[in-house]
Image (spheres, rainbow, N blue to C red):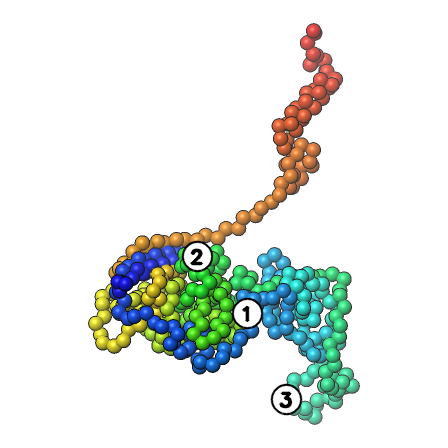
Amino acid sequence: MDSSMLQRPVTTSPGQDLTRQTSRLSISKPPIDLETLQDSGIDGSPKTPKAVAMAKPSPFLEPGRKTSPNTLAIVSLSRDNFQPITLEQSTGAVDGYAEGATLNTRFGSFPHSTLLDIPWGSQVRASVVDTGSRGRKRRRGDVESEDTPAQSHDEVDDEQAPAAPVKAVAASSGFVYILRPTPELWTSCLPHRTQVVYTPDYSYILQRIRARPGSRLIEAGAGSGSFTHASARAVYNGYPRAPGHRMGKVFSFEFHEPRFQKMQDEIKNHSLEGIVHITHRDVYKDGFLVEGKSPEATSVFLDLPAPWEALHHLSRRRTQRDGAGDNSSGPWESPLDPRRSAYLCTFSPCIEQVTRTVTELRTMGWTDIDMVEISHKRLNVLRERVGVNLPSEKGFNSTPADVDEAMTKLKNDLKRTHEFPPSHGNRPPNP
């Protein structure tokens, strides 16, 4: 087989810059034998060749039929108002609520006990909760002074061993829907740390970069995690079950340390650790290798302020930023899969960024460059009833619905005209 292989990265920037590249590059190293690879967290297998401990399935990927404790759920308050919540199984009163952990909304109070072990999509009625002991507990560690009054009998009772949670009683009004988490719902209610890649954008991007079950995807600029969750679902084809078991995976990079730590916590809480590998790194300087090894990615998404600064790392041979070859000594390993085509997308809000990125791509030999702008518009579909006998109100069109109805209306109008009594100035002509 010829050592030259076809590389097809696609760079896409909805909202702004979508690029596709085709170039023929020389592959200087032989294919990697995956069976001899020891896991470093890159191929999804454990770091030692021992048995793999099965991870808890993520509710984004395998939610099951019913809600369960310690899992994420999305509460639908109204059409465009969603709230994420981690369901808790309470063993006693929590924060003064005798019913246990409780979600408070403008539609009422919802103890978690009423949200557990029910099918996803269920409507849940609000409950009448007992808030009698709320606010009377002292903070732990407070030191009482001489001016501190003695504890009342109620406060002494509160500090006793917690009793079993009280069964919730349904209220007369108020309800919410409990929904299983999806990337679309998570995008609409996640905590914003940066500008978010919304559903119309990432759905188009994932299609253009050919993200599919089993793909290895690089994401630079994790931000708020919207694209991370969407790409994890796109590449998911199961959890690794044995050493060397290669599965779809997302390799995410974040430069800002506080955002990196928050993303790390979210990935752990959402049980995505086996699917998403996040790294704290400046990709402009240090590239996209993971623990010194190649992710062997076939899809790349760069949500960076200056994506052209990182493009020289996404090559099948050592190159400099101006596209010239780098003849320095030392081993070189590409983050791209040497046996498959790769597709690259850059996401930029300004045309100046697009121009710089396209110039750098052309300098490095990339071709077939596209720029695509995505505009999100909401279409409201209304049902309109048509008929001559319908009232003249909103949602009704009092015109004939078909030819037969139009002819019937015309005949009725002519009949009423002939039956109308003639006036002196408008006598019918003599026969």
Q: Do the residues labelled 2 and 1 touch (CB within 8 Å)?
A: no
In x, y percent, where is residue 132?
A: 75, 76
Q: From this viewpoint, is residue 196 visible?
A: no
In x, y percent, where is residue 245?
A: 45, 72
* Badge 1 amino acid: Ser
For the point 45% across and 67% down, the residue is: 248
Instruction: Report how far apart the C-alphas of labels 2 and 1 lie in the structure.
Output: 23 Å
Q: Residue 58, which numbered label? A: 1
Q: Residue 74, which numbered label? A: none
Residue 42 placement, left or right of 423: left
For the point 39% across and 74% down, the residue is: 35
Instruction: Report how far apart the C-alphas of labels 2 and 3 lie in the structure.
Output: 55 Å
| SS assignment at label 2 | helix
* Badge 2 amino acid: Gln
Mark closer to the observer (2, 3):
2
Residue identified by numbered label 2: 207
Q: How many labels does the image show?
A: 3
Q: Residue furthest left?
A: 327
Q: Residue 141, which numbered label? A: 3
Q: From this viewpoint, is residue 319 visible?
A: yes
Q: Do the residues labelled 2 and 3 touch (CB within 8 Å)?
A: no
Report crowding for label 1: few under 14, some 14 to 19, many 20 or more residues within 10 A (C-alpha).
many
Sequence order check, earlier mark of 1 and 3:
1
* Badge 3 amino acid: Gly
In x, y percent, where is residue 411?
A: 68, 22
Instruction: Report how far apart the C-alphas of labels 1 and 3 lie in the structure.
Output: 38 Å
Sequence order check, earlier mark of 2 and 1:
1
Q: Residue furthest right?
A: 153
| SS assignment at label 1 | loop
For the point 65% across and 86% down, the residue is: 140
Q: For residue 175, what is the image quadrant?
A: bottom right
